[in-house]
Image (cartoon, helix red, strand yellow):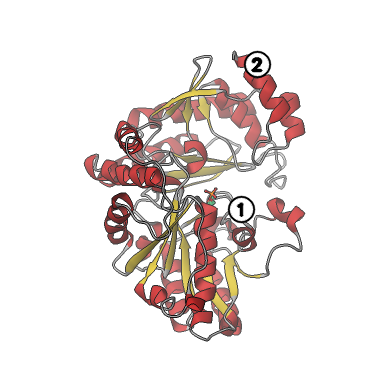
Amino acid sequence: MNREDIVALDRKLLWHPYTQMKAYIETTDPVVAARAEGFYLYDVDGTRYMDANGSWWTCIVGHNHPVLMAALVERTKTMVHCSFAGTTHEGAVRLAQRLLPLCGKTFSRLFFSDDGSTAVEVAIRMAAQFFSNRGQEDKRRFVTLSGAFHGETIGAASVSGVEVFHEALRGLLFDRIVLPSPAQSAAPDGEPWYETAFARAREILLAHHRHVAAVIVEPLVQGAAGMLMYPAAYLRELRALCAELDILLICDEVFTGYGRTGTFLAHAQAGVEADIVCLGKGFSGGELPMAATVTTERVFEAFLGDPSKTLWYGHSFTGNPLGCAVANATLDVFENERLMEQLPLKAAVVQRGLDGIASHPWVRAPRRTGIVAAFTLVDPQRPDDGGYLNDAGWRFYNEAKKRGALIRPLGSVVYFALPLTVTVAQIDELFCVVKESLTAAFG
Ligand SMILES: Cc1ncc(COP(=O)(O)O)c(C=O)c1O
């Protein structure tokens, strides 16, 4: 097929995620991806793009990393799939053995699933059943941060709060208790907002704790809410409060995990460990649908005993051997290429890039945690016209695309989710494009 045929059939037959298809069919000229390598995606016409959002935040060691591809090919020679019920395999065991210590001292059990949403779904069910298995039937409610995003299943969506995504689901989602976001950008200038947010969280949890199974948070960076960043101190206090009130703390590290915030898991920066951690995206190097929920022996033990205590949950592809092979290879790359050791240098280069655009009149709140960076586009003439449906982000996106970078916005928020393998030269190249695109879009 040539490029035009592919685009015509795509417009006629396919339905894309998070896309208003009328506008897409009428106006969008999609990238027709043919090849991917490292930081770059290539269109069938040969155009090269920097994949600055890491293909929806998945691509943690760059596209088609040779170590991952070799593991994948090797695995296909003997076994691509087997169920994970009454069956096990070396790749799964080896992965758990290597990964659990990286998550922290208290983690001792890993449950596989398919993507970030199902990793969260598992966490929700684990937390609710943990308490019912212990005879604490009343503890079934979930607490989330305002603006949270935890995924797409009805369970994961119920603990999420990006309102614009959920209007159509009203009445179908279960009720959650919402804590104010501790993110700085929610604060009036200069106020230590996270302390106020924590004081309010304390009041709310003290009032409801008898009915609360778990608090779920995106540690340090609330991604889909607009890359809202908050200090580790909030997590430290929240961890202590949850322990005091017999509430489980779920850290959804689907986006923040695998190093991009500066530590392998983001919540480690608070010097604490959650009860349950959700992993996805970078878990399989961002190359295959594969995810996991990890927990402690304390949680696991509550599921031992008669059949009614079983975690009745699982998917067809749970523990898929190809996924495990690639997830193991991802850890190989972390070790062999010493990715975490190089991160502070790369984070400094990202900061230099942000500093270089901070004075542009449309750029507000440039922010960074590790190598995750973002800024908000605000029209200096109409500073109140923000929000997810604002078109400033797309004006910027179109200019950046013309210049060879894919930087899909979150409404008016422009952000970067770079692979840890990105080079200093590539970061500099990206920020040159960002600067030129700002000028082209907004003057
Ligand atoms: C924090 C967080 N949790 C869960 C999810 C859902 O992951 P997936 O899209 O793989 O289902 C996302 C996706 O962006 C996320 O950012």
- Viewport quadrant of the N terminus: top right
Q: Residue at x 75, y 55 (%)?
A: 167
Vertical comparison of 309 with 258: above or below: below
- Viewport quadrant of the C terminus: top right
Q: How many other residues sit within 10 Å of disc 2, few (<14), some (14-19) or many (≥20)?
A: few
Question: How much space separates mark 1 and mark 2, taking CA atoms?
Answer: 31 Å
Does residue 203 show up?
no
Q: Earlier in the sequence, mark 1 or mark 2?
A: 2
- Rendered location of residue 65, percent (x, y): 34, 33
Can you tell which mark lies on residue 5?
2
Which is nearer the eye, 410 or 127? 127
Q: What is the three-letter code of the residue carrying label 1?
A: Glu
Can you tell which mark lies on residue 352?
none
Q: Is residue 164 left or right of residue 91?
A: right
Q: Residue at x 60, y 43 (%)?
A: 410
Vertical comparison of 322 with 96: above or below: above
Q: Quick check: is the Cβ at mark 1 less than 8 Å away from ligand 1? A: yes
Can you tell which mark lies on residue 152?
1
- Rendered location of residue 250, percent (x, y): 47, 67
Q: Residue at x 47, y 82 (%)?
A: 246
Vertical comparison of 34 with 219: above or below: above
Q: Quick check: is the Cβ at mark 2 less than 8 Å away from ligand 1? A: no
Q: How many other residues sit within 10 Å of disc 1, few (<14), some (14-19) or many (≥20)?
A: some
Disc 2 on helix, strand or loop? helix
- Rendered location of residue 317, percent (x, y): 47, 50
